Amino acid sequence: MKHSKLTLSIYNNLLDDIAKNENLPRGLPTEAKLASNYSVSRSTIRKVIEIVCSKGIVMKDGSNKIILRLPIKSDYFSSNEIENSKSDIAERAVLKKLYNYELKPGDKFSELEIANETNTNTVSVREALNGISHTGLIKKRAGQKWEVEALTQSKLNQLIEFRSLLENYAVNCLEKQTSDNDSNTKFTLILNRHKELLQKKKVNFSDLTTLEKRFHYTLIKACNNSFIESSYNSLFILINYHIGQIKYDTLKIKNVLRQHITILEAIIDNDFKSAKNALQVHLDHAEKSMKDVNAKMPKYK
């Protein structure tokens, strides 16, 4: 996939927004307006516009861009295509180095080193590293290489608090929505997959992280807010990092699956009081687990 994860995600968000207004033809907002709407650079927006034009959804007319048709399902990039973007490949590689302690606090590395190791490019690697840096795991100093940082309790507390706000808000949004068969179908499929993994003697790490993402992002999408989804990305990086830290602890992994199942069953039954209680149990457990593991991590410097 030649485009970055960010470009593909913003492209899908733009299609959603185009689909909300059936009046055609009509003008597409300016690059500056779109960049502001999605909190990205104009260069990212230009790449997105190139894709919508190549699909025949938008046509360039001088400096103007005209929306010719509404998007259809096949116009969207699938979650699998987005997951296999170059930036996502780089992100997974760096996180693996971090939770396996191949990269320790105080270690320095360059974008080019990661690009060569992952057969990607420095632009995609930079996007991945910028995302990871929001968790406090790494930091870029001007004119220098990236450096691994010790995750402080203060930073961890802030991220945990932010996660609680967003996930509780998502459940509140679900409660306010009218019965949605499509959402229930998605949650039911995710529930069934959780039950399948729970029956396995050993849970495959790749299967687990894929399911983690399906669970959390299906929940967050209930907010119907692209800014919240974008903000949640750094939180999910931390969740993914922690899953890597505990991947050999089968009891912990299966406990996480059971907690998800309790939340999912309550949501599907429209029992949101139970869903909120189950979510709080899950968040409290995640907080304790993250803090326990972080306290035991080597603090090299």
Image (spheres, rainbow, N blue to C red):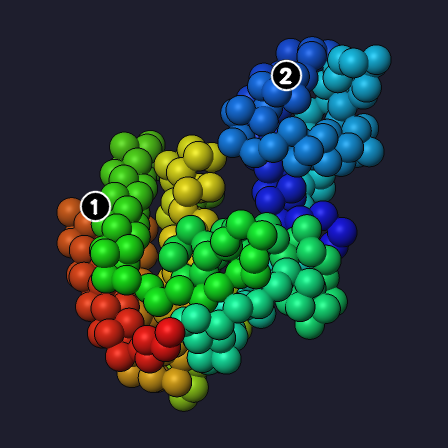
Per the image, the residue denoted by label 1 is 272
Position of residue 262 in the picture relative to residue 142 (left or right): left
Could you tell me the amino acid type at mark 2? Pro
**Above or below — where is 112 with respect to 18?**
below
Mark carried by residue 29? 2
Whole-Å distance between the Cαs marked 1 and 2? 39 Å
The 10 Å Cα crowd at callout 1, few under 14, some 14 to 19, many 20 or more, is some
Residue at image x 63%, y 57%?
Answer: 125
Where residue 51 appears, x then y in whole percent? 76, 36
Q: Secondary structure at mark 1?
A: helix
Report the number of numbered marks. 2
Between 204 and 73, the one nearer to me in the picture: 204
Where residue 277 appears, x then y in whole percent? 16, 54
**Above or below — where is 265 with respect to 106?**
above
Q: Is residue 236 visible?
A: no
Quadrant in which the N terminus is drawn: bottom right
Residue at image x 34%, y 84%?
Answer: 249
Where residue 72 appears, x then y in whole percent? 68, 34
Sequence order check, earlier mark of 1 and 2: 2
Q: Is residue 183 visible?
A: yes
Between 101 and 238, the one nearer to me in the picture: 101
